[in-house]
Structure formats: structure tokens, C-alpha cells
Image (cartoon, rainbow, N blue to C red):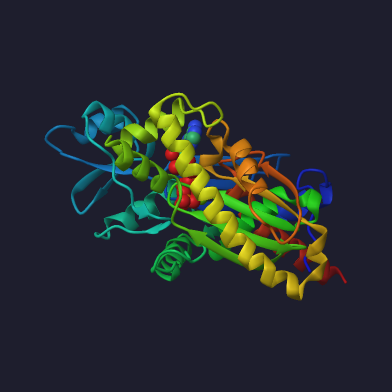
Amino acid sequence: MISMPDSLSRSGDLSAIARKYPVKGLDVGTMNLVSATDIGGKELELRKIRHVFLEIDRNIFAEKVFKDQKIKYAEINSRLFALGDSAFDIAKRMNTTVKRPMKAGVMNYSENVGEIILSVMIHSLIGGAREGGEVCCYSIPSDPFDAKFNVIYHKGIIADVLSSMGYTPLAFKEAQAVVYSELAPEQFTGIGISFGGGMINVSLNLLGRNLFDFASIRGGDWIDENVAMALDLQQSRITDMKETEVDLLEPKTRVDKAMVIYFKDVFSYLLKAISKRLSLSLEKHPELEEGVTIVSAGGSVQSRGFIELFREEARHIRFPVRINDLRAGTDLLNTTAKGCFINAFTKYYLKEKNERR
Ligand SMILES: Nc1ncnc2c1ncn2[C@@H]1O[C@H](COP(=O)(O)OP(=O)(O)OP(=O)(O)O)[C@@H](O)[C@H]1O
Ligand SMILES: [Mg+2]
């Protein structure tokens, strides 16, 4: 069982420990890299960069232009790459699309450029370790149950990048980070789900201990791809519409309606997978019979009507225990980074407590 500081900001004692043992949380996502750092105040410092890049032809954009316009860029083997939001802006102007080092939640780029770019981006986000061996807790997805790959390579590459920056890397499952971030009122008991771009990650915790976790590749990208195929439209256009105008509660357009069909399908697919594993956990942990709370975070939860549609689908599924609450997280894009921070921090907190005994 884990005893957890119930509020990071409330106790002076805890923030003194945080200063003594600096740690960082890092969400390594397919679409976004997000960091959470304690900088001594009441709130964590949260920073974000889009996990995309674009190779630039030197003949079109001189390096000087990059410097003058404060564009984030990297030079790798004499090739020039714009990074993050800058890459997006330039791609739009040039009517082209950005590249991503990750696909379906893990590093997936045929050239090692993707790994170097990841390393440059992480460096620009969190800098080097503030002291030798500072712990950086980073998110990893769970192994997907509906695809063949695993996350071992991905986990190792990020550990290497962080080690080279002076950190002690500590991997943490993305969905468990959601639990640590959001389920303090439930004593860290319940189901955390991260609805990301590349993957959906799920974890059931009992008092902060992971009982099971898994991932599915039917994340936001999968939905966009399938809606685009069904309606014979371009995927990037569908993503754009989903993020700006789609309404899952009152679907009016063909795109709205297709979105509802796919979201509902993903919800019932996911709930069935959870239900199966939960039944097995119940045999060993009858205390779960009191019911569970489900909390959802990640970019996809921002869709209008997302939680309402999820609740509706949950009403139609036979679940082995009562769902006490099904809610959205409080800070959807920062949840994982915060949960990683809390995990690293808690380890120090417990260490400190043990040392004082
Ligand atoms: N305003 C919005 N409305 C609806 N969906 C959105 C919105 N903004 C982003 N999304 C979707 O959220 C998803 C990205 O979420 P998130 O940033 O949590 O992913 P990630 O952590 O980078 O990916 P992963 O965890 O899969 O590696 C994408 O599918 C994106 O289209
Ligand atoms: Mg994510």
C-alpha cells in the first residue's frame, strides 16, 4: 500500500522536501511532450511542446531567418529541422504536413533523426538535471492488447536520452499517472484512462497499487483515420474539424454523426475489455465490490459531449461492479506529467520518512 501526500501544495513540510530532492515529471506523448517541475512555489511549472518536426530546405529558409524569428530548430548531420509549434506554422505556410517521431504511443520513425529530435525537444523542455542523478519520471504506454508491438524499445530510448542529460530515469505507466493525478479523493482507488492521440491507456489501482493496465491503439488518430475513410475525406481535415467544431451531443453534420458512431464503438470496446479484467481482479480483491470511479484525461476528452457519450455507453454495458462516478480529469493535457511528478516525489517523501525513523 502507498501512502501519498494528499496535496502537494498544502504542506510546507512537503515543499521543503521537494526543494531538497528536486524531481521532474515528463509526459512523452505522440502529439505533445509535457513537463511538470517544482520550482519552489505553490504550483508546479507546466511546459508543453508539440511533438512534431519538419525538415527545411536550406535554399528556401536560411538559418539566419530561423534565428531572427526565434524559431525552434535543430541542425542534424547538416540538415535543418524546425521543431514543435514552429514546425506547424511553417508547414501551414508551405502547404505541407509535419512529421512525428512517434506513432501509436511509441517511438516509430525509420531514421534515427526522430530520436535525436526527441532528445533536443526534451532538452528544450526540461534542461539538464539540476543536480547529478535528479529523478525524471517519464510516462510510458502499456502494451497494447490489440496490436503486436510492445513498448520496450521506446522505454529504453527515453531512458538513454534522460541519462545522457544527467537524470536518473524512472518509467511510469501513463494511465497510472492519471490515477495519481486525479484519484486522491478516492484514496487512489479506481480506473484511470488516458485518451491520447496514438493510444488509449487504462489502469486499475487499489490504494495506489496497479492491479492491471493495458492499452489499445484505438486512440484519436484511429478515430480520425476511420471517419476519414468512411466519408472519403482527408484525415488532417477530419482532425481539424474534430478539434474545433464537432459536437458529439447534438450531431448535425455527416462528420458529427460518423464521429459519434466511432466514439461509441471505442467506448463499448474499451468498457468490455475493462470489464473482463476487472472480473478477474475482483476474485483476488473483494474490496473492489464497493464500486470504482473512472476518471478520463488526455486530449480527446476535450471533444464536446465526450464524457456524456461515455457515460451513456457505460449504462449499456454489464459491469462486474458499480461505477461510482465517471468523470473527466481536471487538467486534461497536464494530468500525465503531474502524475509522473507525484510518483517521483512520493518515492522521495517515503524515503525521507523512513530515514527519519
Ligand atoms: N480541442 C480538442 N477537441 C477534441 N480533441 C482534441 C482537441 N485537442 C486535441 N484533441 C485530440 O487529442 C488527441 C491528443 O491527445 P494527447 O495530447 O493527450 O495525446 P498524447 O499524449 O500526445 O498521445 P499518446 O498518449 O497517445 O501518446 C488527438 O487525437 C487530438 O486530435
Ligand atoms: Mg498521452
Residue 220 image position (x, y, % from top left):
44, 45
Quarter-of-image position of residue 308: top right
Asked if 198 appears above or below 258 in the picture, the reply is below
Quarter-of-image position of residue 290: bottom right
Q: Which of 82 and 41 is in front in this view?
A: 82
Picture residue at 76% right of the left edge, 61% below the top: 349
Position of the N terminus by quadrant: bottom right
Position of the C terminus by quadrant: bottom right
**Residue at the farthest left position:** 59
Residue 262 image position (x, y, % from top left):
45, 43
Residue 202 image position (x, y, % from top left):
58, 58
Q: In this view, does 86 lie to the left or right of 42?
A: left
Regarding residue 6, the answer to whether it shows in the image is no
User: How many marks can you see?
Assistant: 0
Asked if 154 appears above or below 225 in the picture, the reply is below
Residue 77 image position (x, y, % from top left):
20, 54
Q: Is residue 295 left or right of residue 262?
A: right
**Residue at the farthest right position:** 357
Picture residue at 40% right of the left edge, 55% below the top: 104
Q: Nearer the viewer, residue 260 or 175?
A: 260
Picture residue at 83% right of the left edge, 51% below the top: 13
Q: Which of 172 and 132 is in front in this view?
A: 172
Regarding residue 156, the answer to whether it shows in the image is yes
